[in-house]
Amino acid sequence: MRIHSISTGHVQVHTSQVRGRGTGFRRRLNVLRDSEWTRPLPIHAWAIEHPEGLILVDTGEVHEASDPRHYPAANPYFRRALRVDLPRRDEIDQQLFRLGLSPEQVRWVVLTHMHTDHAGGLRHFPQAEIVVAADELAATRGVSGRVRGYLPQLWPRWLAPRTISFRGDPVGEFPASHALTAAGDVVLVPTPGHTYGHLSVLVRRPGRPTVLLAGDASYTQQLMLEGAVDGVAIDERAAHDTLLRLQRLTRGDPTVYLPAHDPDSADRYRLEQIVPA
């Protein structure tokens, strides 16, 4: 089994998004009011070459997102609090080609959640099985879904994902899980908070540290260790509980923790740097 780190361009957000300020509605409002931007952050996706088939965790964004007019004007977040830099050559399909892989080889696309910087590249994978948490897909529907920041109008019309409900098979600190592979070495775990149905992916490798592909459960490893909830988390309490579970899991079992926007994720994976005890 081999894991490839892929960054589909970069994104800048306000600093109060990566580390939330305040609580409730005020915390989300502070993200819009903020005038300070982060440095460019990677938009990571991960390709797992597995004996049962090629697995892609998240799909990154598309090059059209570099133009703010790509996003709906009615949602102030996309025009005031998000900057994307993504040339066409760095979209997920092109990056797979450079790795000697292709979109047609992908058996599963697992979405940690359906925000556009994680689901934007879905259009390249019509032949793959798309896997997402049932709670996540439900949260995208209707007017309320668009208010929460989902952009279903940009998803491919053919999209009909397989939904996962977490109801058993506890793993470590997590009360439930779902084994994606028959071998049980790629396991999905619920990590809600950033979104209602956010999930993360555990990759177990005999004799080597576990790899945890964490999406936006936190923006960096350090913020996870500090228990710092991000500024746009839809459920603050669930996000806090998720961070506590991640702390206990990664401290109790040698784990390489890889959030999607952590500038150090690619190097941590390459060097197999585990979360410090």
Image (cartoon, rainbow, N blue to C red):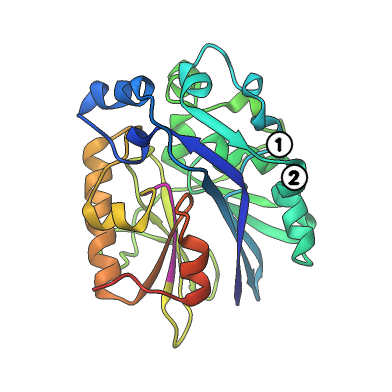
Q: Residue furthest top?
A: 74
Q: CA distance from mark 1 to mark 2?
A: 13 Å
Numbered tag placed on residue 63 in the rendering: 1
Q: Please give the count of numbered marks on the rendered protein.
A: 2
Mark 1, residues whose alpha carbon is within 10 Å: few (<14), some, or many (≥20)? Answer: many
- Give whichever of 62, 222 is nearer the camera: 222
Q: Position of residue 248 (x, y in %)?
A: 22, 65
- The mark that comes first in sequence, 1 or 2, is 1
Instruction: Work out whether 256 lies above or below 45.
Output: below
Quadrant in which the C terminus is drawn: bottom left
Instruction: Work out whether 272 lies above or below 119.
Output: below
Dots 1, 2 in contact, CB < 8 A: no
Mark 2, residues whose alpha carbon is within 10 Å: few (<14), some, or many (≥20)? Answer: some
Instruction: Work out whether 130 lies above or below 187.
Output: above
Q: Position of residue 231 (x, y in %)?
A: 32, 34
Q: Is residue 104 left or right of residue 72?
A: right
Tell me, yes or no, if residue 233 can be seen here.
no
Q: Give the main secondary structure of the magenta stretch.
A: strand
- Give whichever of 243, 32 is nearer the camera: 32
| Residue 214 falls inside the magenta stretch | yes
| Residue 222 falls inside the magenta stretch | no
Q: Residue furthest bottom?
A: 207
Instruction: Answer with the quarter of the image where residue 139 lies.
Output: top left
Residue span colored magenta: 211-217
Instruction: Work out whether 101 lies above or below 184.
Output: above
Q: Is residue 18 left or right of residue 98?
A: left
Under tag 1, what secondary structure? helix
Q: Is residue 213 left or right of residue 131?
A: left
Numbered tag placed on residue 124 in the rendering: 2
Quadrant in which the N terminus is drawn: bottom right
Q: Position of residue 117 (x, y in %)?
A: 56, 39
| Residue ID at (37%, 53%) | 220
